[in-house]
Amino acid sequence: MYGRMNLFGNGTGRTLAACLTLALLVAIPARAIEERIVVAPGQTPVREAAPGVTVVAKDIAPTFGDWVADGATLRSGFRGEPEYVISHDLYKPDTSTDLLLPFDDASMGDQTGHWTRGEGVGPTLDSATPRLGPGAAYFNGPGTALLLEPGRSALFAPRSRFRDFSIEFWLYPADAENGEVVLMWQSIRKVQASTLPQQLSCLVSSGRLSWSFSNFFAPPEGVFHGAGLFPGTTDITLTAKSPLIPRRWSQHLIHFDADTGLLEYLVDGVPEAMTYVTSTGHEGGTVFTPAIGGASPLVIGADYSGLMDEFRIERSFVSAPTLHPYGRDPALVLTPVVDLGYTHSRLISIDVQAKSPGTTGIDLSYRIADEAAAWRLDRPAWIPLRAGEALPDTARGRFVQLRADLYADGTGKLTPALSSVTFNFEPDPPPPPPSRLLAIPHDGSIELRWTRVPVADLGGYLVYYGDGPGDYLGKGALEGDSPVDAGPNLSITLTGLTNGRLYFFAIASYDTPGLRAAGGTPTARAGSVCAEIAARPSRTAP
């Protein structure tokens, strides 16, 4: 019994056009040609034949969205091609951050908003030799010093008293000449009826970096220090043991613990000098804490030549600096959603062009479905895979996406890199239409005959009819409204037609409901219609 089918969206409606025959006269597999789509950041996706297959031309592959990266960034690879790597583990301002200068853009501004840049030319941005991030500050003598004015909420605000603090930065000196001033702050603090000059400085002395704190620390209110001295007079100097090597990055951290009075200087995470800022100069005495006098700018690179990166002041005791560029958290990279062209296409494998030096790693997973409009980051579920390995036969659908989780090595010095992804698949187009269609008029009916479509997954044929060219919305045939499902038969007679009226006919093939990606529903699909034919029923027809 013939019946109407409304399950097929392809090839119906007024806009259907006649097609060229695609069928061969011998049986062919439903999926015979392997193709691949190559996607790479910054490049146009390409669809091409698999190696050894020449019948499919290279073409632009349809994709949706763009690459997505969280914790990853693009860099130029060995051959100049863009590749995703883990982003540097840069400091981010939080509630304890007083000043943060990443020096990653020309503004050279504080990311906390506690400090404002003063007048002056200031340093220039260097993008060639940064230690962390995309840039560093290049200083070239006093004319390029960076002046920063403290705001009301800054640690160095007038008459500020605070406890723990840390100051750190990366340094890449050009020459490390004696007398170069890396950091300078000067002010005046009133003590009773007198004034004390204050200074915090960091300069090159005997080829080493030396910190000096003059009257920067003060005893608690009402406590006097030293016979014959003004209350709160202190002079402290901490000098590194290791020499400052020109044209090599080194990390410098000085931190103060207000609970014990410990003031310690570290170079590349190694303690170089320390003292206790107490009434005894040892642990256990009355602890002196920072006491700021009048308003005064902080001058970075006051008389220094070279690079500086990641300058930070914290309101806490930073026990250890971040010495290596990559952290422990993985980075996430998602490819665009790739359109394989047809539903039910089989994803054979996924290849990646990537590097995993040392103990770095890349975890890969994919998802595939016939629809992608409702996709979110966490759904549908990601399926793990190994690059280049054959995927199960259930890996079917029209839309596919790859996820890559990038892991640094245990030391934080190395990162993996991902430069391109290749999706190898077998497209599954709907079956072609019959190559020939014959219409034989009868009294009140039209007999239609057509050639067999020799594909392995053929499900049957749909018969479209109507009363105008390309208009296949016909009604009135006893076998049903257009389109009529003829099943696997190669002929059908439509009865109940009006004699003398000209009818137009076309045939489309449909496939068998097949496997779908996980969660999908098996459905059949109709292809395009064949060349149109017209016929008129007549009482005089045989």
Image (cartoon, helix red, strand yellow):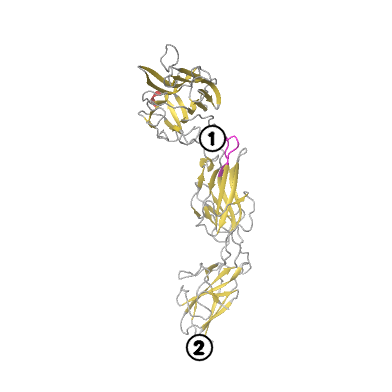
Picture coordinates of residue 21, whole percent (x, y) = 55, 68
Look at the image and tell me in which quarter the C terminus lies. Answer: bottom right
Considering every residue shown, the one lying at the far top of the view is 228
Q: Which residue is mark 2?
A: 540
Q: Is residue 303 visible?
A: no
10 Å crowding of disc 2: few (<14), some (14-19), many (20+): few
Please report the bounds of the magenta region as a residue range: 407-418
Query: Which of the two discs, 2 and 1, labels the residue nearer the N terminus?
Result: 1
The residue carrying pointer 1 sits among few (fewer than 14), some (14 to 19) or many (20 or more) residues within 10 Å by Cα, namely some
Secondary structure mainly formed by the magenta segment: loop
Q: Give residue 32's quadrant in the image.
A: bottom right
Query: Could you say which is closer to the camera, residue 401 or residue 542?
Result: 401
- Residue 35, given in percent of the width and then of the height, sits at 58, 56
Answer above or below: position of 245 versus 346: above
- Distance between mark 2 and mark 1 Cα atoms: 90 Å
Could you say where residue 232 lies in the image, as x and y percent from the top left? 43, 18
- Mark 2–mark 1 contact, CB under 8 Å? no
Above or below for 447 versus 212? below
Nearer the observer, 55 or 430 = 430
x and y percentages locating residue 373 in the rendered image: 50, 57
- Asked whether residue 414 is drawn in magenta, I would say yes
Circle 2: residue type: Thr
Quadrant in which the N terminus is drawn: bottom right
Task: Decide: is 348 above or below 331.
Answer: below
Q: Which residue is mark 1?
A: 325
- The residue lying at 59 percent from left, 34 percent from top is 411
In this rendering, the label closer to the viewer, 2 or 1: 1
Quick one: SS at disc 2? loop
